Image (tube, rainbow, N blue to C red):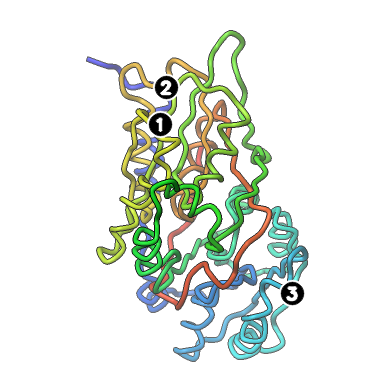
Amino acid sequence: MQIPSIDEGRFSEYLQRSDNETPFSEWLKKQEHPASIILAEGFEQRSLGILEHLASVNAQIPRLIIGRYVERSELNDRYRKRFEQLAQQIAPQRWDILDNHNDGLWIEEALALIDTSDIIIDITALSNIAIFRTLDIAALSNRNIFVTYSEAVEYWPKKIDWEQLKRDLSRIESIAEIVDTKPWLFSYEHKVVLIPGHEGYDSAGSGNALIGFLPFKCARLAAVLSEEVYSEMLFIAGRPHREENYWRFDALKEINLPIIKEWPVFEMSTFGYRNAIERFSTLLFSKDSMLERYDLHLAVMGSKLQTVACWIISSILQSVTVLTSIPAQYYSEAFSEGIGSSWVFKLTRPK
């Protein structure tokens, strides 16, 4: 019988203290105290999700802080006017814009401007790196923080694009090569970075192992592998929780086939941060796991809620090195369309 480790116990304890996501509309009806909101100005329509919902029910909020990206600000031109219209509608004369350098540090300034007991931080338009820093700051603030996230109606690549690509594929091309050159999501030039505050540490004499999320651009993961030699690897393919998007799970595996090779691929829902923690627990604390035998690196390139789970895991297991791959260029017109469901959960600080 395997005896649970101290870290495994901390995972279980966290799951007992934390709550699942709940629909934002239901949460809002039950909320006793009006909450102030902090969110980033994004280039996807879904980044307006929470504000649009509040406007639709004629809600008024005490304070609204918008983080406007300083670099590549032009990406957000499409929805900037709508952000400001909604801000004036739901928080007239009570909203501000702060410079957002994509490092999460503006969150600290935003929190200092808010004096309400309840605060919402919307992660929909935050990058993976910014989510980590944002949650670090939020957890240490000892404020009553709720995290929100909005889905899209449709994500890129769309099914019709994927099917057309496969029809046009010649014998000498691979799916990975042709997808990398497509103007979908982001370019194929990437820079690998350690996530600040979550660099982990390596033990002398131990080899490195990698758990990496499969992205829709194979080159993004290839950049990670070019930086380090890994003795063992395991990959995570995200399965969308909406049935009409299940095809994306198989597409992810096919696109990344040149990298996956014979390494195992672990299925994990793109939705449900607590579900992701439970799935990770299976990976990390099984007998003879990579965590037990190697210095573990975690390449975070999954969904927003999977990234939240990775933040919790890294906060508990501080030896784990967290990294990601940053594209040189984003294609804002080919990320997602529409505003889907919005979700909220109370932020529980890892111990």
Q: Which residue is labeled 1 in the image?
A: 234
Q: Mark 1 falls on what kind of element?
A: strand
In this rendering, is residue 175 above or below 10? below
Relative to the observer, which residue lies in front, 152 or 169? 169
Proximity of marks 1 and 3: CB atoms separated by less than 8 Å: no
Q: CA distance from mark 2 to mark 3?
A: 44 Å
Residue under the image location 34 percent in, 63 percent down? 163
Label placed on residue 290: 2
Residue depicted at x 40% and y 50%: 273
Of all residues, the one furthest to the left in this rendering is 1
Q: CA distance from mark 1 to mark 3?
A: 41 Å
Mark whose residue sits in front, 2 or 3: 2
- Name the residue: 40% across, 53% down: 170
Residue 111: mark in rendering: none
* First in sequence: mark 1 vs mark 3: 3
User: Mark 1 vs mark 2: which is more N-terminal?
Assistant: 1
Q: Amino acid at mark 1?
A: Leu
The amino acid type found where label 3 is placed reads Ile
**158 with respect to 81 (left or right):** left
Label 2, secondary structure: give it: helix
Q: CA distance from mark 1 to mark 2?
A: 9 Å
Q: Amino acid at mark 2?
A: Met
User: Residue at label 3?
Assistant: 97
- Compare marks 2 and 3 and give the one earlier in the sequence: 3
Residue 35 visible in this rendered orientation of the protein: no
Query: Neighbour class for label 3 at 10 Å: few (<14), some, many (≥20)?
Result: some
Q: Position of residue 24 (x, y in %)?
A: 41, 72
Q: Quadrant of residue 39?
A: bottom right
